[in-house]
């Protein structure tokens, strides 16, 4: 008879994983009370574990005392996407776009049903869109998220809609499957997508995808601006920057 040894589970690691999974299900920073209720952990226990996760940069706490996933997880996600440093390759192009257009440029990666703002460059002006690095947004309310869904195909879009129920964040959010599919497939055909105040009233985005050597999607690149300042001529510049970054990541079209 074979004696199969089962390694004992380490409770604190299991609890830390529960907390990070719970944080990851929210598109915005979440309060301790909600995390305690969702994981079944006492608030004092959850707080102690979260403090350790913060010390190790797996979790961050904002000025309101709410929690979000931290930079260390984003860095580990980046390594999974490519052996090339995505941030280092992208930042010069992002800075050039920001300087030329005077608006916020974002680098995002997909994690499950959300995109995570992985890096940003903001203009030196008082009024600009301020996306928080580490914050998350559902795929269907972002320009790059719609492109990611569109490339994944009709079945994946329908599966995403079933999982999430396509919650509305503004009156412009695409909360019907038919409208979402149409926007996703149009975006894929034209090589860019728009967010028309779908995540936040007053804010409009243009997004393109970045590809790695294998041909898989590596990340998304987008411009966020007050909707009244967004210009169609930015589309060509964003696409050129996205193509240049993809080439540096080893992607060869066709």
Image (cartoon, rainbow, N blue to C red):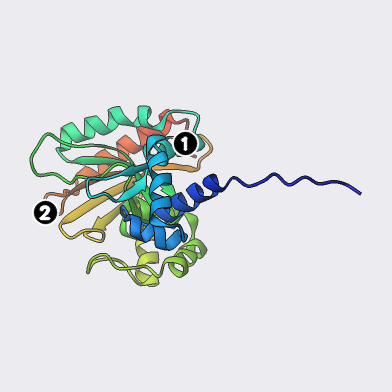
Q: Residue at x 49, y 59 (%)?
A: 153
Mark 1 and mark 2: span between their CA atoms? 37 Å
Looking at this view, name the residue that lies furthest to the right.
1
Q: Quadrant of residue 120?
A: top left
Looking at this view, name the residue that lies furthest to the left.
126
Q: Which residue is mark 1?
A: 76
Q: Indicate whether 149 appears above or below 74.
A: below
Residue toward you, 229 or 50 = 50
Q: Quadrant of residue 36?
A: bottom left
Q: Which residue is mark 2?
A: 228
Q: Residue at x 42, y 41 (%)?
A: 53
Q: Secondary structure at mark 1?
A: helix
**Residue 219 position in % (x across, y down):** 40, 42
**Residue 66 position in % (x across, y down):** 29, 51
Q: Indicate whether 108 appears above or below 158.
A: above
Q: Are marks 1 and 2 in contact (CB under 8 Å)?
A: no
In the picture, measured across the screen, residue 153 lies left or right of residue 96, that is: right
Q: Is residue 216 visible?
A: yes
**Residue 176 position in % (x across, y down):** 36, 72
**Residue 123 position in % (x across, y down):** 15, 36
Q: Indicate whether 135 appears above or below 155.
A: above
Q: Indicate whether 70 appears above or below 87.
A: below
Q: Earlier in the sequence, mark 1 or mark 2?
A: 1
Label 1: how many residues lie within 10 Å, few (<14), some (14-19) or many (20+)?
A: few
Q: Quadrant of residue 204?
A: bottom left
Q: Is residue 58 visible?
A: no
Label 2: how many residues lie within 10 Å, few (<14), some (14-19) or many (20+)?
A: few
Q: Secondary structure at mark 2?
A: loop
């Amino acid at each position: 008879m074979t004696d199969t040894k089962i390694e004992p589970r380490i409770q604190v690691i299991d609890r830390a994983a529960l907390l990070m999974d719970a944080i990851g299900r929210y598109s915005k920073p979440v309060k301790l009370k909600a995390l305690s209720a969702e994981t079944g952990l006492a608030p004092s226990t959850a707080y102690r574990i979260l403090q350790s996760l913060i010390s190790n940069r797996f979790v961050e706490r904002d000025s309101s005392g709410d929690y979000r996933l931290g930079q260390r997880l984003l860095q580990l996600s980046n390594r999974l996407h490519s052996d090339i440093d995505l941030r280092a390759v992208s930042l010069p192009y992002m800075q050039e776009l920001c300087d030329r257009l005077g608006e916020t440029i974002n680098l995002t990666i997909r994690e499950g049903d959300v995109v995570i703002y992985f890096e940003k460059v903001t203009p030196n002006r008082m009024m600009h869109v301020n996306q928080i690095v580490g914050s998350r947004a559902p795929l269907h309310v972002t320009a790059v998220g719609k492109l990611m869904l569109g490339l994944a195909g009709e079945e994946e879009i329908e599966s995403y809609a079933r999982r999430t129920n396509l919650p509305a964040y503004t009156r412009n959010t695409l909360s019907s499957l038919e409208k979402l599919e149409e926007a996703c497939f149009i975006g894929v055909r034209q090589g860019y997508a728009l967010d028309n105040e779908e995540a936040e009233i007053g804010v409009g985005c243009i997004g393109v995808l970045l590809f790695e050597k294998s041909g898989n999607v590596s990340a998304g690149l987008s411009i966020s601006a007050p909707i009244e300042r967004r210009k169609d001529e930015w589309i060509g510049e964003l696409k050129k920057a996205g193509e240049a970054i993809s080439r540096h990541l080893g992607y060869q079209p066709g």
